[in-house]
Amino acid sequence: MSRTLVANAVLATLQPGPVPYGLVPRGALLLQDEHIEWCGAESDLPSFSVDRQWDAGGRLVTPALIDCHTHLIFGGNRAREFELRLAGASYEQIAREGGGINATVAATRSCSEADLLRMALRRVDALIAEGTATIEIKSGYGLTVADELKMLRVARRIAHERPVRIVTSYLAAHAVPVEYKGRPDDYIDAVILPGLEAAHAEGLVDAVDGFCETIAFSPEQIARVFEKARTLGLPVKLHAEQLSNLRGAALAARLGAFSADHLEYLDAEGVAAMAAAGTTAVLLPGAFYTLRETQAPPVDLLRQAGVGIAIATDCNPGSSPLTSPLLAMNMAATLFRLTPEETLAGMTREAARALGLVDRGVLRAGALADLAVWDVESPAELSYRIGFNPLHRRIFSGAV
């Protein structure tokens, strides 16, 4: 057993309560191995013997960031589609003409696991450099059983290559591949369901995701996939109401989903369903920005209903080529009018909830000792600055 004292820190515990950010102006943390043993005001520090002590120099200490929605394993890029959108083409038009997700599917299928790992690690490094310690990674660019498993194996390998925690989501219900065009139910039967069984048997999947949209899968088709997930004891989450309102969020809530993500076209009925089920709203400002969307998620309705709001990069090659959690926080504040406190909670406490994780995202006894130390004068600076990284140090698994 090893015990480390982190002293002379300003703590943003992110614990809910009357104090903004759960702020402790002169605080300390005791880290025992991989966990926080004690957290509070330095004046209340109990008597402990410690193996080492680290002076934070009056800097801000927060939980390490959590990116709870990414697609960061993929081959190729979609810069050409970026040009087409700037010339007036819509995301849906590009997808229907053979671009979009299926363009990345072709590039990803042609890559080896080694190729995908090498490219993914560059994106992971960018997230780590801005204080991230947990990353959710989806499959969904393989769309065959073998290629979906390939992506998930690469995701698992990342945790052995870098000091970061990886959560995987099986997203074969991302798009209908060209070989099954017009036959989505056949694709579900031949690929999605057996692929999910294989991924689960290999220990590659932590949750099951889907894309409920006019260019992807109907609520009825998603329900089939999610019922299979439930028989395997796997939690679910859903891309919902990004381009239209198919009432996917209500479906996700009814099936006990951890989160519903995007939500630009979410209505009051969907908000109420999410609130009743405790389903977290994951907002993805990078996609909103990249697609030049004009309808923002109903943030006021989510607040009024008490729905937790998480923020993520949605790192992907098409609609959100974003690998900066700090920029995602700034976008959430600027584009969606979230407060700086909501954006920080959205990349920590609420992001953990969106992944069903209770051991991170806040500073408290028993939580993982994954911390970010920032050279800032106030927590609001984390979402205020643009293109500036004030990270001083990332503490992972208690190692200073």
Image (cartoon, rainbow, N blue to C red):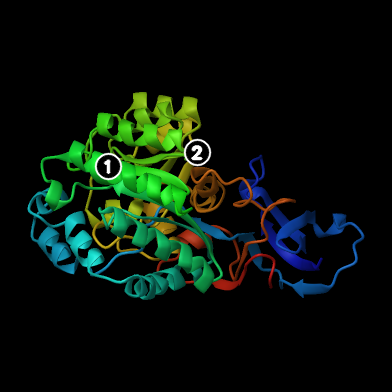
First in residue order: circle 2 vs circle 1: 1
Q: Which mark is residue 23?
A: none
10 or 269: nearer the viewer: 269
In the rendering, at what x and y percent does residue 138 appear? Answer: 38, 54
User: How would you rate the neighbour count of disc 2 (Cα within 10 Å): few for under 14, some for 14-19, many for 20 or more?
Assistant: many
Q: Is residue 352 above or below residue 306?
A: below
* Figure quadrant of the N terminus: bottom right
* Figure quadrant of the C terminus: bottom right
350 or 189: nearer the viewer: 189
- Write the residue at 80% across / 68% down: 2
Q: Quadrant of residue 108?
A: bottom left
| Residue topped by disc 2 | 308
SS of the residue under disc 2: loop
Q: Is residue 369 left or right of residue 101?
A: right
Q: In this rendering, does residue 135 appear at all?
A: yes
| Residue topped by disc 1 | 242
In the rendering, at what x and y percent does residue 176 appear? Answer: 19, 46
